[in-house]
Every structure is written in C-alpha cells, then in structure tokens.
Image: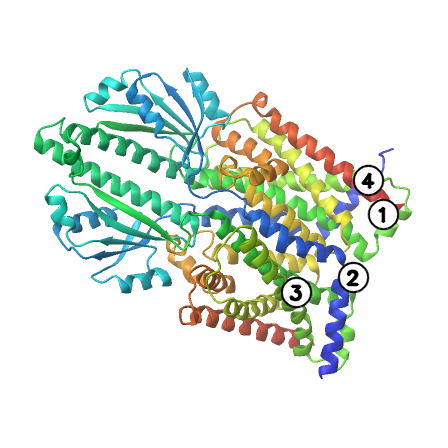
Amino acid sequence: MRGRLLAMLLKEFRQLAADWPIVMIILFGFFGGVYLAGHSGAVDLKNYPVVVLDLSKSNESRELVSRLRPPNFKIVDVVHGDREVVASLDAARASLAVIIPPGFARDVQESRGRFQVISDGTQSQMAMLAAAYIAQIAGQYGIELLERRIGSSEDQLASLPQVDARIRVEFNPSINAAWFASLFELFNVITMTSLLLTAAALVREKEHGTLEQLLVSPLRPAELFAAKIIPTVIVVLLLSPVSLYAIVHGVHGTPLRGSPLLFYAVTVLFVFSIASLGLALAVIARNLPQAMMLMLLTLWPMMFLSGAMTPPESMAPWMRYLGLLSPLRYFIDLGFQVLFKGNGLMYVWQDILGILVLGSGLFAFAVWRFRRLL
Amino acid sequence: MLDRVPAIAMKETRELLRDPIYLGLAFVLPMMMLLLFGFGMTLDVKHLPVAFVDHDDSPWSRDYRDRFVHSEYFDLVGVLGRRTEVDEWLRTGRARVIVDVPPGFGRDLARGRPTAVGVTVDGSFPSRAAVIVGYVSAINGLYNQQLLVDLAARRGFGASGLLPVQVNMSVWYNPTLESKNAVVPGLLVLILMMFPALLGALLIVREKESGTIFNLYASPTGRLEIILGKLLTYLAVAMLDYLAIFAMSRWIFEVRFTGSFLVLTAGAVLYAVCTIGVGLLISILTRSQLAAMFATFLVTLTPAFNYSGFITPVASMDPVGQFVAQLIPATHFMTVVRGSYLKGFGFGYYWPQLGALAAYTLAVYSLAWLFLRKRIG
C-alpha cells in the first residue's frame, strides 16, 4: 500500500513541477502578495487630506487650523475662494474642507463660534472617522477656551473637572494596518492554494480521462485522495513559515507572540480541511471551469463570513451562525488569537475542533460521492 | 486583413452559448457577487462589545457609563468590580474594549478636580480598533464639554449650554454616508476586473490544453485576428454584465447616480477591453487552466480589492501602495465610477483617467500580440 501511495505522490509532484508557471504564481502569492498587502493603506485616519479656506485670518482661526495636524490630518491646500474649495474636493485632492467664516474670532469670544466642514462622503467609513476627529478637535479647542476663561491662574487650571481617557490599544499599539493586512493575505493565499491545487489535481485526471485508469488500478479512493492532498499540505507547509517570518514578521515587523508550533499544527489541519473541500467540489465538477465556479461560489461566502472583512459582532445573527460552517472563520480566529495575542491551546480548542469536524465531514463526503461515481 | 475576425467571433459566441458553465461564469456569478457583497458587506462598525470595570460605582461613574450604553456603537457586555477577569475577556474576544473607572472618579469630579479612566482596546483588527478609538474619544470629549458647560453655567460664565466652538458638518457626494453608495459602485469596478479577465484567461490556454490551438496555429488566421475575434465576443459579454450591474445598482440598491451615463459607459468599454486583454495575456503566458485561473486571482482581484481605493483611499496609502495603485487599471476606473455615480461630471473631467486606461490597454494588447507570435513562430 505504501508503495502505491508513494508512486502516486511522486507523480503528483512531477506534474506540479512540470507546470512552472503555477510554481511561479504560488511563489508570488506567498511572497509578493503578502508583501504588497502590507502597503494597502491605513485603516485609521492618517494624513487625511484637508483644504483650508480661512476668511477670518485671526489668532483664533489660526489656532484652530494649527490643530489639524499629522498624524491624523494633513493640510494639502490653503485657498482663498469657494471655487477653489469645490475644485479641490471634486478632484479628490482633498477629502475634507475646513471653512472659517469672517466673524469667527468675535463669535468665539461670545461663545458661539462656528466653522464649516465639508466632507467627501464617497468613502463613507473614512468620512465618519474624520467627522469624529474634527468634532473632537473643535470640542477640545472649546474646552481650552472655557478653561482659560474659568481658570485664570495656573493652579486653578489644573483643578477643573475633566476626564482624561487614557486609551491604550492592546496587541497593536500604533494601529499598524500592515500587521493585520499581511497576515490576513497569508491566510487567504493558504486558503486559495489549498483549494485550487487540490481540486485541480483531481479534475485534471477527469479532463484527461486518466481517472478511469486510476479507478481500475489497485489504488483505493482514500489513497487517491491522500495523494492529492499531501502535495498541497507540503507546499503550504514549506512556504508559509518562510512567508510568515521573512515577510509578515521580517519586512512588516508584525510581532509574533504565540506558539509557532501550535499555529503550524493547526495549519496542517486547516489545509487538510480546505483541500477536502476542494476534493468534494472536484468530485462533483466535470471539468476545471465547472470546479472553478463551484470554488468561487464557496470561497466568497467563506471569506465574507470569516469575520475579517466585517467584525463578527457587527454581522446579522444569521450571518454569524452561517459563518460557523466555514473552516476559514475558525482558522482566522485562531491565527490572530495565537499569533497576535499569544493565546494558548485552552483559548483556541474550539476553533481546532471546528476545523477538524468540518474537514473530516468534507473528506467523508468526497469519498462517499466518489464511491457512488464508481 | 481582418476578414476572419467575424468568423472567430462567431465561433467563440457559439462555444460560449453551448457551454452552461461558461455562461454561468459570464453572467450568473457576477450578479451573485454583486448581490452577496452589496447586501452583506457593511463597512459600518457598530454594536461593539464594551465592558466596564467600575471601582467607583457612584452616580458619576454610572452617568459616564450611560454615555457608552446609549450610543448605537457600543453594546455593554458586563460591569465588573475586578480587573483580572476583564483582561481575560479581551483575550477571548468577549469584549473589544474595556473602560476602567478608578475609585474616587465621582469624588474628584464633584470636587471639580480632573480624573482619568483607563481604556484598553483590542487592536488585533486594526480597522475596528481605529473606529473604537474614534468613538471613545468622541464620547469622552462630549462628556468633558458637558462638565465644563455645567461648571461655567454654575459660575456664571458664558451662555449656559452653548459651546464656544462648534462644527457645521456637511457631507457632499454621499450625504447619508451610507456604505452601499461606496460599496456598490466599487463592486462594478471589481466585477468588471475579475470576470472579463477570468474568461479571457481561459480562452487560449483552454485551446492549448485541448490541443485545438494547433488548428489555429495551422490556419492562415493572423494573430491580430485571433485576439480581436476573441475580444469581440467577450466584450459583448462584459457589456451585458455592465448594463445588468448598472440597472441593479440603480433599481435594486438605489444608489445615487448623478453623472453622465455616456461617460461611465465609455469608461466601462475601455476598462473591459483592458481587463479582457489582461486575461488574454495571462492565457498566452501560462500552460494550464489552473495556472491561468490562479494568476488571474492574484494579479487582478486581490490588487483591485486592496489598492483601487475600494476600501481605503489611495491618498492614505504609503508610497509603495500609491505606486501600485497607479499601476493597476482598477484605480483609474474607480475614479470614473465613483465620480460618475456620486460626483457627476462630464467627459472633460475624466480625460486623465480615460487616457491612462487607453495607454494601459494599448500596452496589454501589444504584449499579448508579441508573446502570441513567439508561441506560434
């Protein structure tokens, strides 16, 4: 039995190596893709481009403008007329316009200062964050003005009722998006590789008509499937640590706190689980385009419900429950818990169980459908 | 010289119509993607689980807590007396943010003295963390304002209830800040990137795998005729997709459309020609359908998703990100699409984007033409 499996494995590897474009593409995914994902933009408000129209030209207005500073805001343009403000927003050179009216200084003294902010709403999430920050800047400025008025001397200033919210972001203190994005891309590449390579390996036999030869050979279905899954597992296990340490950790500086061994053990399970899904789809499909359709039909909902695009708590309950059927959901949860938070086995055993149950179920389904085919 | 183009286009069309799989890939999946992501993808982060550690337990601390509870952004998952348990909640994800109110919080405020609270945010998902930091700061800021306004009123300064500096916020282009207005037009860009490229990518490599490519090699058909014939059929497919998506965006998702349909259509034609070309190029360069598929995913969908400005604005990317953004056609088409839907200008406004798309298209087809010759010769 071992001889048969070994021969089959050798054949699979030879076939993979012969298709050099696919080898290049996988390498690109694990290294280039993961590298580039770290540069796909900040998720918090960083250098948000602002255009300023200051009609007041007073100390008060200048003080307000000086508060629009990096890291959150960047003044890209100071203009002198309405038209220029509009042009700046239309061309998306600026995403926020701050317009300070002529009587601002006087109004501020009379406690009714108002200024106008126009926000580009095309990117709704960023616009909402910007609104929160601007409101905070205006509020803080107002508080300081009130403080100056109420507390005339220094020691009185220090004794005003104020709550200082000391915010600390655990696990990623400077909200570096690259840490998350590169790791998430690595998980995606692992998923895509596991699904595509395995499904293609089986469908190819169907398309070339060599499946019948394998069927009449003494090879058992489970052996055939093992021969299709093992190369994928090996490819992923060879490439993902290199990518994890060289790119995610090395280039993007993501701290890896947890146990790499635990993560790798689960990666094997996960690849097995997704590869089983690939096999199940390949058993149903007649050719590669058909398999691809089925893969897209399963891959998208899986990525969506994984909790990495929309946080689980913001999802509708039915989506959260549906997500429990996706191995990716458990893997992402586990990956971030183990690698980011340094959580151990006792925190993630449910995720492991989920991957194991879904994977075995899919494998059993693939074998069952395949037997019926015979 | 190009008289065989219609014949090739006819052959491709017939093949397409006979194959339910390709039809599904061409029409059913794009619509599914639109419906799935359009309805399911919400970028609004709400109902974040917050836990309070209240060492003070005074009317003041309860009032402060109410500010969080009564906003739609936070859901209170628990109030505890001890700190240790709650750290555990952050690890397990039961709470995403913990507010630690120290003993004496109410006493300090009542005596008119400053105090502090400790806020710990789960940073494992950065976009969520950024939003939490924004919300917490805003709620805390409002609370402070209220404290000062009350104090000022008590001491007889200023008009009570009024704040010295206020913001008049107006939002342009998408006044309700609904994420569907950002997501659905963005999906048009992603779908017209992915499916034309995917169909194009399978075209030549499929003939390579089945061996029919030799019929083409042996026939007197020129390279340009092969490329154009295949392009015509799939351009028609892409345009049908485009019209369907446009109709759905207007009448199912009810996205605002303020611009010129003509400009958008011109952009879509150029963009689809370009993305089919990307697929054809991949198809010419690869040997198997698997490689073609995989390459299409990696060089079209992922970059378009990450760099086109679909989720994060190009302006907030670092230099590497901005460079990649300029390099992919999706970014340029995204400007045309978002602009046409939400900002609404004419042709004069978009010529740099349309020009970039044209240049990109020309480059892709020149490369395809060059590499196709190598294989035939």
Q: In the image, residue A68 lies at what x, y percent?
A: 37, 30
- As measured in the structure, the alpha-carbon distance from the residue carrying label 3 to the one carrying label 4 is 33 Å
Residue wearing tag 3 = A235
**Which label was assigned to residue B375?**
1
Residue shown at the point (74%, 69%) measured from the top left: A12
Callout 1: few (<14), some (14-19), or many (20+) C-alpha neighbours within 10 Å?
Answer: few
- As measured in the structure, the alpha-carbon distance from the residue carrying label 2 to the one carrying label 4 is 24 Å
Residue projecting furthest to the front: A154
Is disc 4 placed on a helix, strand or loop? Answer: helix
- As measured in the structure, the alpha-carbon distance from the residue carrying label 4 to the one carrying label 1 is 9 Å
Q: Is residue A277 visible?
A: yes
Left or right: where does residue B344 sit relative to residue A62? right
Q: Say which of marks 1 and 3 sits in front.
A: 3
Depth check: give the residue in front, A250 or B71: A250
The C terminus of chain B lies in which quarter of the figure?
top right
Q: Say which of marks 3 and 4 sits in front.
A: 3
Left or right: where does residue A248 sit relative to residue B284? left
Determine whether label 3 and label 2 are within 8 Å by CB.
Answer: no
- As measured in the structure, the alpha-carbon distance from the residue carrying label 1 to the one carrying label 2 is 18 Å
Q: Amino acid at mark 3?
A: Val
**Which label was assigned to residue B370?**
4
Chain letter of disc 3? A
Residue shown at the point (25%, 27%) measured from the top left: B165
Determine whether label 3 and label 4 are within 8 Å by CB.
Answer: no
Are labels 1 and 2 on one chain?
Answer: no
Q: Amino acid at mark 1?
A: Arg
Residue shown at the point (33%, 51%) measured from the top left: B47
